[in-house]
Amino acid sequence: MNKRFMAAMVVLCTAFSIAACSPSSEEKPVLVFSAIPDQDEARLMTRFNKVANYLSDALEIEVRYVPVKSYSASVTAFRNNEIQLAWFGGLSGVQATQLVPGSYAIAQGVEDPQYVSYFIAHADTGLQPSEGFPEGIEGRSFTFGSKSSTSGRLMPEFFLREQYGKSPEEIFSRVGFSGDHSATIALVQSGAYEVGALSYQVWDRELAEGKVDPDKVRVIWTTPPYPDYHWVIRGDVEQKFGEGFADKVRQALLDLDDRDVLDSFPREKFIPASNEDFLPILETARSLGLMD
Amino acid sequence: MNTTASGFRRTTLWLGLAGLLALFVADISITTRDPGMELGRISSGFLSPDFFATEQIGSALGYTLSFAVQGVTLGFVSGFLLALLWRWRMIRAFSATIRAVHELFWGLLFLQVFGLSALTGLLAIAIPYSGIFAKVFGEFLEEADRAPALALTPRSDAFSVFLYARLPLVWQHMKTYGAYRLECAVRASAILGFIGLPTIGFHLETAFRQGDYSSGAALLYLFLGIILSIRWWFRPSLLPLWIAAALLWAPPRANYTEGALSRFLTEDIIPAPMRQNDWQWHQLTDWLLMLAREQILPGLGNTLILGMAAMLMTGIIALLLFPLISSQFGNRFSRAGGHGLLVIFRTLPEFLLAFVFVLLLGPSMLPGILALALHTGAIVAHLSGRFTDSLTLRSDASGGLNRYAFEVLPRIYPNFLAFLLYRWEIIMRETAILGILGITTLGFYIDSAFSELRTDRAVVLIAAGVALNLLVDGISRRLRSHLRLRNGLADQN
Amino acid sequence: MFQFNQHTLQRQGVTVLQSLNLTIQQGEKVALLGVSGAGKSTLLEALRLQQPDQVAWCPQQGALVPMLSVFHNIYMGALERHAAVYNLINLIRPLRRELEAVTQLAAELGISEKLRTSVDRLSGGQAQRTALGRALFSQRPVLLADEPVSSVDEHHAQSLLMLALARHDTAVVALHDRQLALNCCDRIIGLKSGQIVIDGASNQLSKHDLDILYQRR
């Protein structure tokens, strides 16, 4: 009993000392980035490790990707400097730049200044595609994507309020948040919700991959365009990685032409962006009471 | 009538009426168009589990166990220290408060400061568990025989008296309870994955939400396997090794940014109107009133409705299921089947069950009620059924329904009621977090506040949840002492 | 050494002994007799309160810690003689010095082979020997014992009691065996209905004289 007790104590003390002494910050600075988990979450690591490898080669430092479960978690991580670079949606991007003074947008996809959302409906509702705002969605059940999504929540809610002058809870019989765009398709397709709103890109991709059953769910409306996804970097990276680092990152992103890597987002290519490009999003978020 | 049973009947009647009323106003519609088809897809997933589809499954398992082992160890030690001061009202109130906040909410709070780190996982489990351990150990010590300590020479120092004449009396109970808590902690640790910590729940949530039921089923099987095999891989003598392994796998550290904690305390949780330079009191009251009207009251109302309805269903399910494992009924094979069924529902966390039921039935209150009732009902049925094993009936006792109604039920009813009332507080705690799944209980608004990065609102909402929990705890305790129910066994939440 | 002057003793709010007058001198070996409920235990507790630091205490049922070994239960008599850390170490790992002392005592009490057995696995008689062992190990001058040998067989009871009495300068022992009391003690106090009804030297009393304690009124 005593020998075992002593042995146990030795093991414990060793473990404690190793746990306490192992370096908490590596010798060489590591750039850590993340992305909002907007779609295809099961393959996040596979998708974004490609991006990490590309950036690592281009910047000649170690670059690591960490997966997060929610949009807000990515913003919190950015705020706490757990990540220095992030691929945000419109809303999460302005949340981040508001919360972290000195941080700014550096690049966006070529598609992003003209992003749109689709409203989709289950076939049984009989709702038909229309040019103008769709008739007959009032009183049905409706799902957004993530609570912090721009194309899955913020802009659809904005257009809904603009149309009806009241909140989604008052417009629909039931309002849900699916969590991400892929889940929105699944929920409307299964009939859990009759109508939903999501990013056009995710719909187009899943349709092309045959994951959508066109007999069960279809697009009924395309919203007017608005700016969405962008890369945001912390202002203090220059102190950690050297002068001009943010510009180097921006250039690496703009230079990216590897189709395989670009498909992870998916984007055709990246173009420069600045905080001002997303002021409309900030205004909208404030008008909906999502930001103070 | 002047029988012992009439007191129990009255309590049952009131609880039943409250439950019925709740069921009546609750939104229990099935909102999916074709639950049968989804059920088919889920079933075929469970028949063809895919163990290789999930990225980094090994490390997810490692984190799940690491957080659980570390959390329970820290909770055990600090809960024990709190239990030593149990006679102080302050300590009791403090313990009740920290255990009234669910692990997931603690996790969401610590995420703001320590990020997605091992430290967050550790604290999210250790803090509420300290409160639970404090209560249970405090009661153990209160109930332990004082005679050995009083018989010692009065000049012996207090520490030695405690070591020799108090601690040995409760040590075995503490060890047993700690091992049981480890099982709960593995569940809690897995669930923490739902908010982003790298445990098995992270991948479970993804797989099920994306409709990838084969890899989801594989993860669920792994999870069940781990919990059901605890008794083999976890022995008290191996504890130091497990702690060492857990510390090495996930050193309790965080990529802590200078000032994050003070920012959290002096900025994030300060109500928004008070952060302006020249704020006035009426702005704060307006803000609180707005929060109360739009979120706290609807959230509390729905939590209460769902919780009470779940309580009623729990009672019904437990009364139906306990004969399955009771030695007073059935035969060896029916009992083995009954045990199997109850073990599965006891082992799967209610949060996880609710998550799957939401996929099947849509986000009304129905999935929540079902999940809570099945999980808690299985626990109460297990405890009640085990209790019937200690009954000795006359050899000429009747069989079948008569035996159930005349011989067994009257004898176990007080215990059944005690088990159920002990569970009430836990049901309410779990009901609150179901909001994270989209069911509009308090947790829905808390989750929204966090996703809008409004920690100030989240803190006020969590405090409202704590108040509800303390209230329910108080009522339950009063009912139990009024009915003179006492059974430490049931405190296994 | 002990003195009561018109004292009234209560137990849980009920008066057990009324207007008690009693003096016990140093060096006396006193037996307390009386039916159960006569107030023997209450009187012993009151005596203990008068000289808390002089008394080796051996209550009824022993008040042992069931999960601990005989060694530890006996050692508990000596807790006050050592620092808390010393006690802690001895709890985790019995120290040789203490082990030797306790072993010797246990041998005299006839339980040396049970030294590492936990108390909950002992017979009633063995547990009583352990409790007596603890009292002896506390090494104090006054023994107060409540039915210390009631579960030990007659023959051993006397030698055990003699052993315990011999180690103490003064002793007050509650007993139910009249012969044992007459054989071992030099003063007998009989309690009945809240009063002292017998108080005399044992060589002046016969077993017959004591019968009055057990007769119904």
Image (tube, coloured by chain):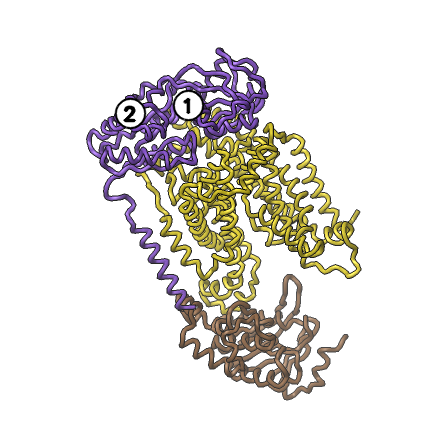
Chain colours: A purple, B yellow, C brown
The answer to whether residue B484 is visible is no
Mark 2 secondary-structure assignment: strand
Q: Residues within 10 Å of mark 1 (few under 14, many from 20)?
A: some
| Position of residue C182 measured from the top left corner of the image (x, y, whole percent) | 64, 85
Q: Amino acid at mark 2?
A: Ile
Is B366 above or below relative to B8? above
Q: Quadrant of residue C217?
A: bottom right
Residue denoted by label 1: A201
Q: Quadrant of residue B9?
A: top right
What is the chain identity of the residue bearing mark 1? A
Mark 1 secondary-structure assignment: helix
What is the chain identity of the residue bearing mark 2? A
Q: CA distance from mark 2 to mark 1?
A: 22 Å
Q: Is residue A247 left or right of residue C192?
A: left
- Residue drawn at (36%, 30%) of the image: A264
The answer to whether residue C45 is visible is yes
Q: Which circle's residue, 2 or 1, is located before the other in the chain?
A: 2
| Position of residue A138 measured from the top left corner of the image (x, y, whole percent) | 56, 17
- Residue drawn at (37%, 36%) of the image: A46
| Position of residue C23 measured from the top left corner of the image (x, y, whole percent) | 58, 77
Is A205 above or below relative to A17? above
> Which residue, as the protein is rendered here, is positioned at the far left?
A243
Contact, CB < 8 Å: mark 2 with mark 1? no
Residue denoted by label 2: A106
Q: Amino acid at mark 1?
A: Gln
> Which residue, as the protein is rendered here, is positioned at the far bottom?
C203
Number of the front mark, 2 or 1: 1
Is B72 above or below relative to A80? below
User: Which residue is at the front of the view, B322 or C200?
Assistant: B322
- Residue drawn at (46%, 51%) of the image: B72
Q: Are marks 2 and 1 on the same chain?
A: yes
Q: Is residue B317 left or right of residue B105?
A: right
